[in-house]
Amino acid sequence: MKSLGTVQIPQNVLDYWKSLGEIETVQYQGLEGYFSLVLNPGKSNASEWEKLRKDGASVMSKLPKKVTEIQLVNVDWDAPKALAFAEGLILADYRFDKYLTSNEKRTALQVTLLGAGSEQLVEVEIIANAVKSARNWVNEPVNALNAQGLGEVFAEMGKTLGFKVEVFGEAQIESLKMGGLLAVNKGSQEPPTFSVLEYKPSGAKNQQPIVLVGKGVVFDTGGLSLKPTPNSMDMMKCDMGGAAVVGGVFEAIAKLQWPIWLVGLVPSTDNRPGEMATCPGDIITMYDGTTVEVLNTDAEGRLILADALSFAKKYEPQLVIDYATLTGAAARTLGTYGSALMSQAPDSVVKSLKKAGENTYERLAELPLWEEYYEEIKGGIADLKNLGKGEGGAQSAAMFLRHFTSYPWAHIDIAGTAFATSASHYTPKGGTGVGVRLTLEFLRQYIHG
Ligand code: BES
Ligand code: MN
Ligand code: ZN
């Protein structure tokens, strides 16, 4: 039994919570570490939900350490607002503290919800936990999580949650002739991996799979085209942020048991300037036979993704979405406020992706795939060059990828959004887990309509 007593919430914190306009009353239950927030009813739309997530996060940030359980009482007839508040609270309840030797760790907050939305809270929690897993993988440095480690994470998850995972090692990648992945791996002391995840429930709505591809560069030094350290190489453990999206989506989908056939492909390696590293000017042969002149070894993401996109053809996919921390240009274009979408998929898919972006506030802005960008990377002394002009760099990178596709395809460049250099609201500093909520919302729409 819990001991009796009350949690002291300072008056100024209570006043602050009420000033948010979302909380009607705070009720103590007379139990230590436990109290209720009664939420105000009100209008419901995407921007309102985002305000509620932020308010949930501010409640979390000002919560006395002693509080271990919080009950939300939704007096509205409608669920989404209360769920958004709960989501913000739960997403803000995150610390990457496993390497701290001090004893400041706090256990996860237990959240319950009374009223409309109570059954959906489980779903919100599963999704938020998948976001936190994605954050964890991004936050792990390369000396703790290399390409093999990432493969093991997926294999372990498949075993626990009951879906198929196959992790190709170096020998298999060589015999498959994945020249892009092998070229990026050449300067590394550690072998590459190529993970294939498959979740195929019996009642799946789709006859052809949706394939999710994630860039799994566990660390990007730039290779011989070495990056400078300040504000550049220093953050490059985040370069497997796309792989983290794929992992997070599979974790949630398998727990939620959604009726959708999904395949995940994650090419993974570090990008290093070791002795045998690929040199600028090297010409390589990709998995599909295309030759590429590698003019800049720091444009490595497109090389490993290209092999995965070619590999995806064998599934005759209904749709392929790739997630990649691909270009600084995408980050410079949109800042940290949204990810860049470049797509060659039906309008309905683009519309649904954008809507999912608004609903989750993991917003997408579309950039064009004009043929002129393809001209930039075509030809020379090999079929393709891995480098276009500096201007429009997100689009020429995307056009490089497009060369390897033959199916409806959407490319999401998360270079500006995968890793936060400072905390804000429910997004902590470090890995953000961006893309997980977006994709699950998109898949939810797909299943329902
Ligand atoms: N991983 C980087 C892109 C990146 C930049 C991710 C900032 C996250 C934050 C990618 O591999 C890269 O180095 N891109 C180059 C490409 C260039 C050499 C054509 C870039 O954007 O500068
Ligand atoms: Mn790079
Ligand atoms: Zn990179």
Image (cartoon, grey):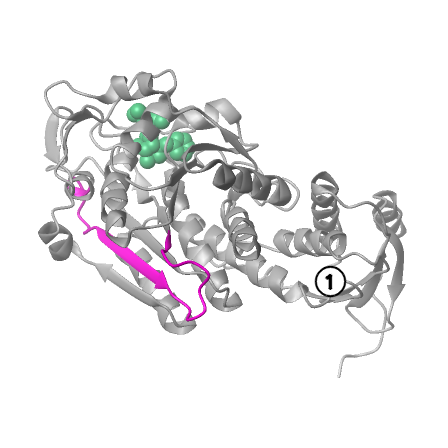
Magenta residues span 185-210
Give the number of marks: 1
Pick the residue in front: 194 or 66: 194
Amino acid marked by disc 1 = Gly
Query: How far from the left and from the top, in percent, is residue 134?
Result: 46, 53
The vertical placement of 319 against 272, above or below, is: below
x, y percentage for residue 194?
Answer: 24, 53
Q: Quadrant of the N terminus?
A: bottom right
Give the left or right position of residue 188, taking residue 42 as reference. Answer: left
Q: Quadrant of residue 165?
A: bottom left
Viewer-nearest residue: 137 or 248:
248
Residue position for label 1: 117
In the image, ligand 1 is in what quadrant? Answer: top left
**Residue 376 placed where, x, y %?**
26, 17
Q: In the image, is residue 299 above or below residue 236?
A: above
Residue 371, image quadrant: top left
Query: Relative to residue 222, is residue 279 drawn left or right?
Result: left
Picture residue at 20% right of the left edge, 29% below the top: 224
Please say whether residue 198 is one of the residues in the magenta stretch: yes
